[in-house]
Amino acid sequence: MISALQARDTTPEAQAAFIAITKPPIEIKIPRPEPLPTLPGVSPFDYSYLPDALRDYVRDISERMQCPPDFAAVGVMVMMSTITGRKVGIRPMRNNDWTVIPNLWGAVVGNSGVMKSPTLKSALSPIKKLQATAFDVFNKAKAEYDTQTELAKLQQSVNKTKARESLKKSDTADVSKLLQSSEPDAAPILKRYITNNASYEALGELLMENPNGLLVEADEIVGLLKQLDASGQEVARSFYLTAADGDAPYTFDRIMRGKGLHIEALCLSIIGGIQPGVLAEYVRQATGGGAGADGLLQRFGLVVYPDISPNWKEVDRYPNSTARETVNMVAERLDNLNPTEIGAEDDLYGNVPFLRFDNEAQILFSEWRSALEHRLRSGEEHPAIVSHLSKYRKLVPSLALINHLCDTKHGAVTEAALLRAIAFSEYLESHAQRIYSYATRPDIDAAKTLLKRLAGGKLPNPFKARDISQKGWAGLENPSKTQSAINLLLEYHHLTEEEITTGGRPTTHYHWIKGAV
């Protein structure tokens, strides 16, 4: 067969037409979709961040439960901060009277089933042992008090009878001594360390009786946060914000509760767990301006969100009794701490006794503080990060004091204790960066939401940006957020775009590359 190109009477036009219809189509290569960015990486936990006395205890819990050591470490450090409370503070500057109370707020972040609650339960067992002992002491004292109260009532009844008889015999008899009150000493007060569920008014009453401070333990800390976010809880929220510093007085003046109920200083520590999905939503709300942007979230200095290892092995062994007893002894020592015996200075105005840094630590702290302050003022960080890091002014001295009290026991706070605190804070910052990425990179979550909606057939394919905004989906509820999500999906080749001109203003259509989720 003779091809058309070989025919003599073939014209140039015919040849061009033949080539056009017989030439293989040009293959347009669409880039392969790439995985969307994930959460920022975090620094791995290092046991050297902890005081020597606490390391084996945390390691034992982590190994037996096959969970990240980060969880137990945060629990133990918050526990020690609670027990120390307002017994002694630290003055981070050489001459200034700025005093830091070492109470800490901590939270562990992880999905359900990663052993958050069991780990914290084990980590907090020493303080719960102190609480159990306090209950025993109180119950015995209360029983004795009740007995003495009844005896006093009986004696008073007998004395009244004697007084009547004396007055019957002589109306001028002196019976004043018989009528004097003989009540026992003041009722015993239960020493409290922990509370799990209390209104801020009840917390106030507990703190009046326990001026050293308390630990608020919440299994799911988001419940507490949302409670404080609710309308009508503004006073409770202010109460918690004040209690984070551990040094401000508070007075209740309520008709129902009486006037002038004074608390020397509000001092609360907090510990609990939270799931990532719930945290993401809360972070976006708390950093978006309004009432939630008052720094409540940023006060959680010890918040960790570690990666969960895919590896697991069964560890069936007895708890490390030596490590446990060591931590119990540290807890008891801090519970009975006498500021004078550890070399703390008394405040001239009756405030909390305090320690200072030694010379080497003072130089190091000044250098660290200077770098922090310049960074906070650089304008290079997201406002939420700036707010969080500003709380490190209190966090780092607090950690240094706890390190010192757990290991060194007396004298000025050492450079080693401060170095450990600074290293711990750098590790904690990496976790804070991960957590606040929910606010600093909302486009990632929005893009993931959009992909799920596309895969679920909730949008046409192709679609327009307006199709998404009209849905009102969380994270995609306005044109700006919608376009940010689309741009990210375009960047990672999950979408292609096409401009359609119909005589008026061009319209952009987006095509989803199916199977890219």
Image (cartoon, grey):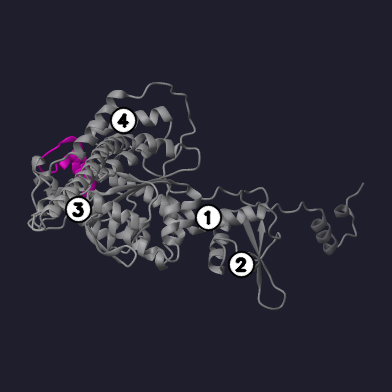
Mark 1 / mark 2, whichever is N-terminal: 1
Asked if the residue under mark 2 is in contact with the one under mark 1, i.e. CB atoms within 8 Å, the reply is no
Q: Which residue is mark 2?
A: 469
Choose mark 3 or mark 1, whichever is in front: 3
Mark 4 / mark 3, whichever is N-terminal: 4
Highlighted magenta segment, given as a residue range: 397-419
Q: CA distance from mark 1 to mark 2?
A: 16 Å
Task: Name the element at disc 2.
Answer: helix
For the residue marked with disc 2, what is the amino acid?
Answer: Ser
Across and down, in percent, residue 295 comes to 34, 60
Q: Residues within 10 Å of mark 2 (few under 14, many from 20)?
A: some
> Residue 416: within the magenta?
yes
Task: Name the element at disc 1.
Answer: helix
For the residue marked with disc 4, what is the amino acid?
Answer: Tyr
Choose mark 2 or mark 3, whichever is in front: 3
Q: Residue furthest right?
A: 1
Task: Name the element at disc 3.
Answer: loop
Which of these two is toward me, 283 or 325? 325
Residue 445: which numbered mark, if any? 1
Q: Which residue is mark 4?
A: 57
Say which quarter of the image contains residue 64.
top left
> Residue 141: within the magenta?
no
Q: CA distance from mark 4 to mark 1?
A: 37 Å
Q: Which residue is mark 3?
A: 100
Q: Residue furthest front?
A: 169
Q: Residue at x 14, y 46 (%)?
A: 361
Q: Residue at x 24, y 36 (%)?
A: 331
